[in-house]
Image (spheres, rainbow, N blue to C red):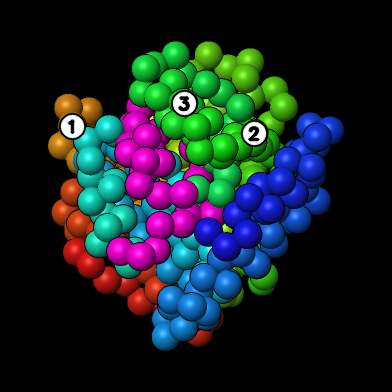
Amino acid sequence: MIGGERIREKICSFLKNGDRRPAVFIAIIFLFALNFLVWSRIFFSAENKSELEIYSLPVGQGDSQLVKLPGGAKLLIDGGPPNGELLAALSRILPANDRYIDLAMISHPQLDHFGGLAEVLRRYQIGLILTNGGKSGQAAYEEMERIAQEKNIRFISLAKGDKISYLESRIDILWPDNLGFLANNPNDNALVAALFSNNTASLFTGDIPAAIERKIAGFFKEPVDILKVAHHGSKNSSAADFLGKIRPKLALIGVGKNSYGHPTPEVLERLAQIGSAVYRTDQDGIVKISIDGRKLEVFRDW
């Protein structure tokens, strides 16, 4: 990577005082943007960098989304279970000579959301790993941490009020708040991220239950364009009042073969009642959403 070591040194200097507030992340993102754009001029000059692309990835019974922001920076949200499916999906989307992902975000430390990241870390260079500050005692999480440490990849915790800016795109962290870790259920602490880019609003919800959905619903004054449906379509999430408030045009469900009944008929009916178009990774494979600021296109089994 061009200038990779120098960039990591600069990041470390930003973090010496343990400050994780918005200004830190803005500076970090711009550093990665500069580094990435050097590569893009060399290898990907023909690729359209003005579009926002969101991919919902089929990783079995788990969650993973890849976001390619206008300008070229890439954000991987969650990594699915440790079954090799995430690596296979990324290899279909990213060119063989593109082995850099700017940011990886783990919504919460449950195996179906981080298990596939160890494999990705072995194959790709990741700029930073963003978490909610929680950890898992599982061997898979410790393996992921070990590989990240070997590759000098930093973990940074986020919470409500943090913001990430990259060119004209912005990510607002809506949850957890500072009291989040008083909860016993790790789903209650999941990172919730709102992405504003190319005149669209997208919401990534991890596995939050209805009680947390109601806490964040007031953030949105206008309908949401894209919703990553919480908890794979569990009946305990996607509450009718929440969906009625944000009214997503598109609903993405990360789901595979399971014994939980996900996505539940109740959630599918609630989404149908508000007119959301539903895309499921178990039926639609890789779902690609392409947005140029004027139109939104969806491609199934991409």
Q: Is residue 211 magenta?
A: no
What residue is pinned by disc 1?
A: 258
Q: CA distance from mark 3 to mark 1?
A: 30 Å
Marks 3 and 1, the one that precedes in the sequence: 3
> Looking at the image, which residue is at 50% across and 32% down?
150
Start and end of the magenta stretch? 96-125
Residue type marked 1: Asn
Answer few, some or many: residues within 10 Å of disc 3's Cα (few below 14, many 20 plus, some between 14 and 19).
Answer: some
> Looking at the image, which residue is at 31% across and 55% down?
90
Left or right of 221: which side holds 46?
A: left
Question: Can residue 244 be seen at all in this image of the molecule?
Answer: no
Question: Front-most of 83 and 201?
Answer: 83
What residue is pinned by disc 2?
A: 157
Residue type marked 3: Arg
Q: Secondary structure at mark 1?
A: loop
Q: Is residue 117 magenta?
A: yes
Left or right of 76: which side holds 88?
A: left
Quadrant of the drawing holding the C terminus: bottom left
Q: Secondary structure at mark 2?
A: strand
Q: Secondary structure at mark 3?
A: helix
Q: CA distance from mark 2 to mark 3?
A: 17 Å
What residue is pinned by disc 3?
A: 146
